[in-house]
Image: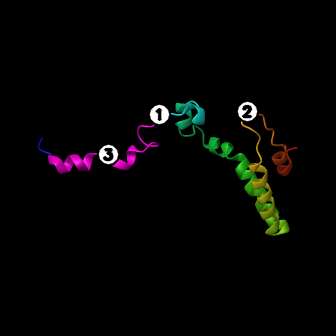
Amino acid sequence: NSRGVSSLLKDSIPLTDFSASGLFEGHDLLRRGFTSVKNELLPSHPLELSEKNYQLNQDKTNFDTLRNIQGLHAPLKLQMEFRAVKQVQRLPFLHSSNMAMDTLRGND
């Protein structure tokens, strides 16, 4: 081999890549679900990304409108209430309708 030892070390994988969550970790079905190639692909249509982020864009527009009408305190208070409602959850095996979040967003 004419490349020498230094080139072999340069081409090797760094030791940080051998951690438990790194290169050799198996896929955890219980935590991450089934893998799908479709989920890893880029959006096929320009509006698909916009539709996936619809609720986030809607909330941002509502916060901007609320800030312009009522001032800075109103969107901050509403965001604080959103965070409080998101922290309240049921046990994983129970269905949660998250009625409080629907009420805050006006979807009730």
Query: What's the residue type where badge 3 is placed?
Result: Ile
Q: Identify the residue at horizontal 52%, vertical 31% (top origin).
A: 37
Distance in Å between CA atoms under marks 2 and 1: 25 Å
Which element carries disc 1, helix, strand or loop?
Answer: loop
Q: Residue 58 in the image: x percent, y percent?
A: 75, 51
Taking depth in this image into account, of 89 and 1 the one nearest to the observer is 89
Amino acid type assigned to the residue bearing label 2 in the image: Phe
Image: 27 above or below 18? above
* Residue nearer the viewer, 15 or 38: 15
> Within 10 Å of the Cα at label 3, are there few (<14), some (14-19), or many (20+) other Cα atoms?
few
Image quadrant in which the C terminus is located: top right
In-image side of 3 versus 69 (left or right)? left
Q: Residue at x 79, y 66 (%)?
A: 67
Q: Is residue 74 left or right of residue 31?
A: right
Write down the quadrant of residue 92 in the picture.
Answer: top right
Vertical placement of 80 versus 30: above or below? below
Location of mark 3 (residue):
13
Q: Is residue 73 magenta?
A: no
Please state the total of marks drawn on the protein image. 3
Indicate the secondary structure of the residue bearing disc 2: loop
Q: Earlier in the sequence, mark 3 or mark 1?
A: 3
Front in this rendered view, residue 11 or 53: 11
| Quadrant, the N terminus | top left
38 on left or right of 86: left
Q: Residues within 10 Å of mark 2 (few under 14, many from 20)?
A: few
Which residue is disc 2 drawn over? 93
SS at mark 3 in the image: loop
Residue 67 against residue 5 in the figure, above or below: below
Magenta segment boundaries in residue numbering: 4-25
Residue found at x 19% / y 51%: 6
The disc label shown at residue 26, or none: 1
